[in-house]
């Protein structure tokens, strides 16, 4: 698919709520070729478009180099060549629907858990292979969506497409080279980097962000999903949520058919409702309940009884809530955080659940906790 037609598809998703489906994706693809050009597309006709073979050559080159890495350095990478092709196919298949969700809702669901889960089942006991599969499957898709977002902004700003492509390509090469060089220098110049127990107190080289990747490789690659969510684990029941996520949009569609006069039903966007929880910070249940009350019930009643107000001020309300959270975070840091002080009240004082600290393993007896 050409970059121009994909941008037209994403632009058509800006101003209305959608439920991503195969039929809709196909219709948008056809409309991108037949739809009447808007003023932005007509103005961009003055610039030369990007030849498709630029993308094809870049794709072939990156896959070729990655295949060499997986074949000749397999002892270090641990991922077989077919794992690379599988990860590339995942990224290719999910880029378009996730791009539509991003263009519509400004939220980008990730494939990090899915890629880790799949490779953990296929090749358990290989943490590096799991991380590499995650990079090629999830990060490739995320970078593609970011790449399209930049092109979309440039499209509205009337920046020549070829200039945008070259700037992004050259910037990626320079940034990637510098990142690898700096990481290599740090690993060989700082003793015990990323090892908290061996570093001096208050050392800045604790690598909290890198530990996320390391922990993921251990959980999903070394331990494996079978020991957590499979027959050997305690959380196999959570796999049913995959079925729930697949059936959810179908239920919304049935409700819309059963109650066609309820105009709010087709506006239910499950990718937003379910994916938005991933952006919530880890907190007590009270924080989640407050989010549900303000974000769901409050907006429902406003849309039900004040539809025109909701249509006019919904985005302003959302921006105001986000700005309020950001402002309070900065204000609390400067007023309390810098002085190492805090406020303890019912809302942040524990889980308010006496059984929250009870063990979940079978056969362990703790005073005040039920025996499983």
Image: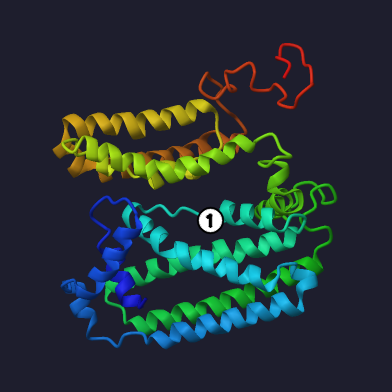
Name the one closer to the observer, 371 or 204: 371
Taking the spot 54% from the left edge, 83% from the top edge, the residue there is 60
Taking the spot 74% from the left edge, 71% from the top edge, the residue there is 184
Taking the spot 34% from the left edge, 54% from the top edge, the residue there is 20
Q: Is residue 247 visible?
A: yes
Q: Which quarter of the figure has residue 221?
A: bottom right
Taking the spot 46% from the left edge, 65% from the top edge, the residue there is 93
Which residue position holds label 1? 111
Name the one closer to the observer, 230 or 53: 230
Query: Residue 167 in the image: x percent, y percent?
Result: 44, 80
- Label 1 sits on a secondary structure element that is loop
In the rendered view of the protein, which quadrant contains the N terminus? Answer: bottom left
Query: Residue 8 in the image: x percent, y percent?
Result: 27, 70
Name the one closer to the observer, 79 or 189: 79
In the rendered view of the protein, which quadrant contains the C terminus? Answer: top right
* 256 relative to 176, above or below: above
Q: Is residue 59 left or right of residue 319?
A: right
Q: Is residue 367 left or right of residue 255?
A: right
Query: Residue 175 in the image: x percent, y percent?
Result: 57, 74
Q: Is residue 326 visible?
A: no
């Amino acid at each position: 698919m050409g970059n121009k037609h994909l941008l037209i598809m994403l632009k058509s998703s800006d101003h209305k709520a959608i439920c991503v489906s195969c039929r809709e994706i196909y219709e948008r693809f056809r409309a991108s070729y037949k739809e009447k050009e808007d003023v932005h597309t007509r103005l961009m006709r003055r610039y030369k478009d990007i030849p498709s073979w630029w993308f094809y050559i870049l794709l072939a080159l990156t896959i070729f180099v990655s295949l060499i890495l997986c074949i000749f350095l397999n002892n270090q990478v641990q991922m077989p060549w077919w794992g690379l092709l599988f990860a590339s196919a995942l990224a290719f298949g999910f880029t378009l629907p996730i791009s539509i969700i991003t263009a519509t809702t400004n939220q980008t669901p990730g494939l990090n858990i899915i890629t880790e889960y799949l490779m953990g089942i296929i090749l358990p006991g290989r943490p590096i292979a799991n991380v590499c599969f995650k990079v090629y499957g999830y990060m490739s898709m995320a970078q593609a969506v970011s790449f399209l977002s930049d092109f979309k902004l440039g499209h509205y700003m009337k920046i020549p497409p070829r200039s945008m492509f070259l700037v992004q390509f050259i910037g990626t090469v320079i940034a990637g080279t510098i990142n690898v060089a700096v990481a290599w220098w740090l690993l060989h110049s700082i003793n015990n980097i990323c090892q908290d127990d061996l570093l001096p107190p208050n050392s800045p080289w604790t690598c909290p962000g890198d530990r996320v990747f390391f922990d993921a490789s251990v959980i999903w690659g070394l331990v494996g999903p079978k020991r957590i969510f499979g027959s050997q684990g305690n959380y196999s029941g959570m796999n049913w949520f995959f079925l729930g996520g697949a059936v959810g949009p179908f239920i919304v569609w049935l409700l819309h058919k059963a109650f066609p006069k309820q105009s709010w039903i087709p506006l239910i966007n499950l990718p937003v409702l379910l994916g938005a929880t991933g952006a919530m910070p880890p907190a007590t249940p009270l924080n989640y309940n407050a989010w549900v009350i303000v974000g769901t019930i409050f907006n429902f009643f406003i849309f039900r009884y004040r539809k025109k107000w909701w249509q006019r001020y919904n985005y302003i309300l959302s921006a105001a809530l986000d700005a309020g959270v950001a402002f309070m975070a900065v204000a609390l840091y400067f007023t309390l955080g810098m002085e190492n002080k805090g406020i303890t009240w019912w809302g942040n004082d524990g889980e308010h659940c006496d059984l929250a600290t009870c063990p979940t393993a079978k056969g362990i007896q703790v005073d005040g906790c039920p025996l499983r």
